[in-house]
Image: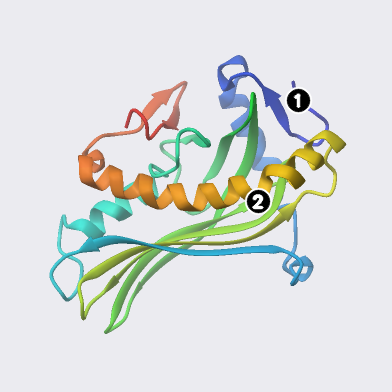
């Protein structure tokens, strides 16, 4: 069922044509402007230690590069909360993604776009990551940043997730009530679980496996690799 605002409420994403819905995201703009972002927006900033490798720049094929591979493909999201659908041949910058979020018995399809890629090396750190912003029809407005960072001096590697967001203004009363009661709790759980999921994927060797694919889409399912 497609609402005018573009929010999809469905029992399962397999009941809609994902390729068509994903293609439609190209015509959707980001649903906020920076001038709107103020102190009343929700902000999150979480750091998850992943481990360490030899001090200095990232080791070829080492923990840092493995973590970057997982983060690039969005293969760290907790499967009980969210899945991602996107064109597997799309470049990272500008990539449209259809996020399938789970909220109780309902599933929601929400569009986001990768609007920034970070690739930085200084004498003390190497940083790599990307950011997405919410598109028209998303249940929220805002931006989420993911970053893998290595400290050259200590060899420690961390995963960082930071965001600012607030619920979309045009949302039906039932969802507004549900978000008021459970939304922040789900957000905090999500930020805890992304770190747990990424560490588990690195431990089990998931970096060598590829995301599932259906109808030309990458279907990122951390539960199955």
Residue labelled with disc 1: 2
**119 sits left or right of 130 in the view:** left
Q: Mark number for residue 184? A: 2
Q: Cα distance, mark 2 to mark 1?
A: 25 Å
Q: Nearer the viewer, residue 106 or 87?
A: 106
Q: Mark number for residue 204? A: none
Point 46% across, 52% down: residue: 192
Q: Is residue 106 above or below residue 14?
A: below
**189 sits left or right of 118 in the view:** right
Question: Where is residue 149 shown, x and y percent of the image?
Answer: 33, 68
Would residue 54 be visible to someone looking at this image?
A: yes
Q: Nearer the viewer, mark 2 or mark 1?
A: 2
Question: Where is residue 74 shown, x and y percent of the image?
Answer: 42, 44
**Quadrant hosting residue 133:** bottom right
Q: Is residue 8 above or below residue 30?
A: above
Point 62% across, 48% down: residue: 185
Residue projecting furthest to the bottom: 123
């Amino acid at each position: 069922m497609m609402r005018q605002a573009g929010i999809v409420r469905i029992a399962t994403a397999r009941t809609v044509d994902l390729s068509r819905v994903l293609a439609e995201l190209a015509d959707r703009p980001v649903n906020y402007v920076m001038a709107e972002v103020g102190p009343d927006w929700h902000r999150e900033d979480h750091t998850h230690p992943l481990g360490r490798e030899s001090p200095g720049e990232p080791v070829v094929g080492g923990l840092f590069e493995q973590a970057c591979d997982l983060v690039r493909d969005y293969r760290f999201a907790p499967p009980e909360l969210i899945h991602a659908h996107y064109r597997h041949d799309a470049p990272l910058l500008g990539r449209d993604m259809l996020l399938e979020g789970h909220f109780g018995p309902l599933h929601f399809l929400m569009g986001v776009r990768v609007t920034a890629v970070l690739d930085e090396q200084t004498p003390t750190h190497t940083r790599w990551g990307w950011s997405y912003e919410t598109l028209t029809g998303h249940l929220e407005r805002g931006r989420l940043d993911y970053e893998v960072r290595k400290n050259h001096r200590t060899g420690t590697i961390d995963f960082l997730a930071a965001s600012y967001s607030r619920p979309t203004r045009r949302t039906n009363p039932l969802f507004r009530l549900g978000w008021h009661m459970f939304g922040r709790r789900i957000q905090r759980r999500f930020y805890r679980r992304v770190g747990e999921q990424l560490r588990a994927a690195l431990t089990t060797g998931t970096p060598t496996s590829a995301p599932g694919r259906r109808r030309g889409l990458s279907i990122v399912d951390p539960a199955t690799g």
